Amino acid sequence: MATTTAPTFTLHKNVTSFLKTPRKMLIGGEWVDSVSGKTFETFNPATGEVLGRVAEGDRADIDQAVKAARKAFESGPWPEMSPSQRGRLIWKLADLLEHNLDELAELETLDNGKPLFFSRMVDVPSTADLFRYMAGWASKIEGNTIPLSARGGQYFAYSLREPIGVVGQIIPWNFPLMMAAWKLGPALAVGCTLVLKPAEQTPLSALRLGELAIEAGFPPGVINIVPGFGETAGAALAAHPDVDKIAFTGSTEVGKLILQAASGNLKKVSLELGGKSPNIVFQDAELKTAIPGSANAIFFNQGQCCTAGSRLFVHKTIFDEVVEGVGKAARKLRVGPGLDPNTNLGPLVSQEQLDRVCGYLESGIKDGAKAIVGGQKGAGSGYFVEPTVLVDVKPEMKVYREEIFGPVVTAVPFSDPEEVLPSANSTVYGLAAAVWTRDISKAHRLANGLRAGTVWVNCYDVFDAAAPFGGFKMSGIGRELGEYALELYTEVKTVYVNLG
């Protein structure tokens, strides 16, 4: 693979201004410093250099934000708004995202490292699309009339769906802006208020989103954004007794801690967690599609996807051809800074993540796996790692069993569907899977047998705001996107009326 050098790139003037000013947190419609006065640095993954400084929230700031959200939920203009008024506000926020697309894409690339092309073509447009989809739901939150069989009187019964209340939302660093939308969109559509804690590695686009929310006209306290660290701000939010629901996207290990913290007041919890997704290529697959699709499944977003196709199962008759094809695709990738227009594989998000991925590479090779391409830390001062294809992998190896969250795929041959299905399911995760075959019956059988929340057939990483997303087993609790996301943020109330 080729390595690009830092490009000469003129940043959007608003981005330059945004980075020069220490960023505050949004509480009650105001931009404020942390109670402690502390700040933390955010880094450019392409260079390791400091991008800017951000207010560091902790328990005291979370408490203020929750109080602001509670006040906005129970009084003021937000609870008095009609559903269509809420929908118009959410739609206006989507318009503002599109109007500021170039600026937001640059912030996302600088903070996360991903290629600017993907920020412009995927992250920001998908964020706007999600808000528009959820804006349409605001006026369609319905209950039902219920026919009763109870004896002893005449009754009319109906159900209502009401907003659950104050919501705490904790988002990851791999798709910062998009993950903020996945959380905010449905919560706002049903009428909740919220406190959002962005990942400490990537807080910038969420804070800019907060500015746009104010510009759109959201009342004070409806959207509060408190940057900070997971063990302080995140833990305080998950445990806060006046938060009615917590929504988290991140690692399975942290998801378990969120569940424990939420037990104090039995707040509702939804979790979108890790994955070790099987990507299965049969001998009858259309290889001109399956090979680049399998490469994209692992190398998109530097492999920093919970759905990444990190376990590649290939029928033994085509194993060498497919593995060589994926390896060839890896060699063609240009690794470099996300702002370079020639880059299609950026750096990992942080030094910590680079150390983690390199540790897995060392472990795999020590245990006997062979890297047919990659296998090393990338060149340069940023957090680069080579796209890697590992063969001679055994099920007991950590690289096979554990989520790496980097551009590393393990390739394993198989002989028949009866063999591959148990192997594909032999993991604690169940987030996503893919099947490549021209046999429609085989495709449906495998899709039915795979224990995963999403199964792709002859494609990979296809998402839509209307389609539910979430995991089986230790990949999470609940479903985001689509109508199912509304269930995460509503309570059902039953009303009986005596007609006697």
Image (tube, rainbow, N blue to C red):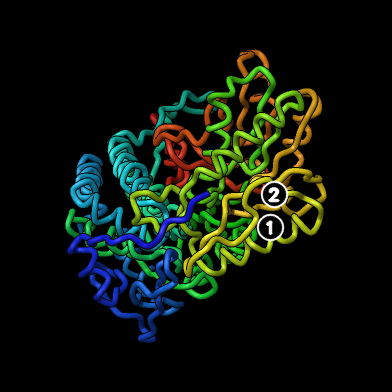
Residue 220: where, in percent of width, then height?
23, 64
**Res 392 quadrant in image:** top right
The number of numbered discs placed on residues in the rendered structure image is 2
Assign a secondary structure to mark 2: strand
Q: Position of residue 127 (x, y in %)?
A: 33, 45
Which amino acid, by three-letter code, is at mark 1? Leu
Pick the residue in front: 491 or 316. 316
Q: Nearer the viewer, mark 2 or mark 1?
A: 2
Q: Secondary structure at mark 1?
A: helix
**Is residue 74 at least partly visible in the picture?**
no
| Residue displayed at 72% across by 61% down | 362
- x, y percent for residue 204: 34, 64
Q: First in sequence: mark 2 or mark 1?
A: 1
Which residue type does callout 2 highlight? Answer: Ala
Contact (Cβ within 8 Å) of mark 2 with mark 1: yes
**Pointer 1 residue:** 361
Q: Position of residue 103 (x, y in %)?
A: 24, 56
227 lies left or right of 15: right
Residue 44 visible in image: yes
Q: Which mark is residue 371?
A: 2
- Report crowding for label 2: few under 14, some 14 to 19, many 20 or more residues within 10 A (C-alpha): many
Q: Is residue 475 left or right of residue 269?
A: right
- Label 1 neighbourhood size at 10 Å, few (<14), some (14-19), many (20+)? many
